[in-house]
């Protein structure tokens, strides 16, 4: 029996190769969206940065709107991972919320989630804008649930979980606009400093 | 002597008329920038919304980039008024900062300042982007100064005024993206709820 690997790709090989190509295209696209903005980004430039042609992008992803919404989906899914991780944290509700905020803030500074903050809904088609709004609402609801659990066990002081969630998200989203690794603190240090301020705000007073 | 007003405008009349026309054009433009985004806004549509022609806009303001930067200047100047007002508040540093945050947050929800938050620097020419960054830095420094004064008189607990200023600004800027008057609370109520959370964060512990 011949023990050399077959030169013919299996169905699994092809699926892996396809997924890797899609991800390489999405990473190139999200980098340009974040640097230049959606409107100033051309798929020709995205394709050229990988040495492929625009039809390759159409083949794997579709048109520019579809490329953007795929990037945003990854960005929101990554934020939801912060919630999944926070769910495994031992301790009280405030501990889980604080863990979530740190993970959320660090994720925001990675390209796909950063793109979620930097992209206005007005860039998207009506259908895509609604899809994005529904995805963001999942993150908001996850944050509200963590806040409510901390209120229930007495570890979080809060008048309105909805407003607190917007306050926390705003503070942690904003670095997507201003954070520049060239100026000092690492993403995790920067986020930790912001989270420390936010935590003081919801830590109950004796 | 004839006591009817002269039908011929004085230099003052002409200056006032010119200022009123500029402001009407800027208000029409900022409304569209906020609704559609900078790229999807055409000066033809802005002009049409006032029943004038595009050359009228060029005459009073210049091209689309120049119109945008004029809107952003008004937006930043309005934010600086929040600092001027806060400076007159009797009380301690925390009282002045809290006043500033409330005025800042309400100003952010008005069209010109809202446009400052909604507009990415990538929309602007390099020169205009630098100009905008310098203007925003004035607001940031004003906020840092208020924080330092509260730290000095013991009314504000803070490890790093720079990080706290970004945290507070982020939380109060974010409603420029999500706040919709159709859903309940007024701008000032919404901002007051956010500021209450933020204030808990910098109020010293006994």
Image (spheres, coloured by chain):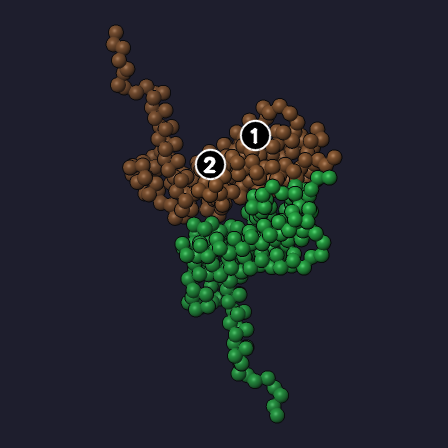
Chain colours: A green, B brown
The correct choice, above or below, for B170 with respect to B13 in the image is below
Is A90 in front, or is B4?
A: A90
Element type where label 2 sits in the image:
loop
Residue drawn where x is 44% and y is 37% of the image:
B111
Residue B138 can be seen, yes or no = no
Residue drawn where x is 73% and y is 39% of the image:
A206
Is B139 in front, or is A149?
A: A149
- Residue B143, given in percent of the width and then of the height, sits at 60, 34
Q: Chain of mark 1?
A: B
- Residue A102, given in percent of the width and then of the height, sits at 65, 51
Binning the other alpha carbons within 10 Å of mark 2 as few (below 14), some (14 to 19) or many (20 upward) gives: some
* The residue positioned farthest toward the top in the image shown: B1
For residue A19, side relative to residue A127 (left or right): right
Number of numbered discs visible in the structure rendering? 2
Residue behind mark 1: B83
Residue B190 can be seen, yes or no = yes
Residue drawn where x is 36% and y is 28% of the image:
B20
Residue behind mark 2: B110
Residue drawn where x is 67% and y is 59% of the image:
A88
Q: Mark on residue A172? A: none
For residue B21, side relative to residue B166 (left or right): left
- Tell which tag, 2 or 1, sits nearer the viewer: 2
Element type where label 1 sits in the image:
helix
Q: Chain of mark 2?
A: B
């Amino acid at each position: 029996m011949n023990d050399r690997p077959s030169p013919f790709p299996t169905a699994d090989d092809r699926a892996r190769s396809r997924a890797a190509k899609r991800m390489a295209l999405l990473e190139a696209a999200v980098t340009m969206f974040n640097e230049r903005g959606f409107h100033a980004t051309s798929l020709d430039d995205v394709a050229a940065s990988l040495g492929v042609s625009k039809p390759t992008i159409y083949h794997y992803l579709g048109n520019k709107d579809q490329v953007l919404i795929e990037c945003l989906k990854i960005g929101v899914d990554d934020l939801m991972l912060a919630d999944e991780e926070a769910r495994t944290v031992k301790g009280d509700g405030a501990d889980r919320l604080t863990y979530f905020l740190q993970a959320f803030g660090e994720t925001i500074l990675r390209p796909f989630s950063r793109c979620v903050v930097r992209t206005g809904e007005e860039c998207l088609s009506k259908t895509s804008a609604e899809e994005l709004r529904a995805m963001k609402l999942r993150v908001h609801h996850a944050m509200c649930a963590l806040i409510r659990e901390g209120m229930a066990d007495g570890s979080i002081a809060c008048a309105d979980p909805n407003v607190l969630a917007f306050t926390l998200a705003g503070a942690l989203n904003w670095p997507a606009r201003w954070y520049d690794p060239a100026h000092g603190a690492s993403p995790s240090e920067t986020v930790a400093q912001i989270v420390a301020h936010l935590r003081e705000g919801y830590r109950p007073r004796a």
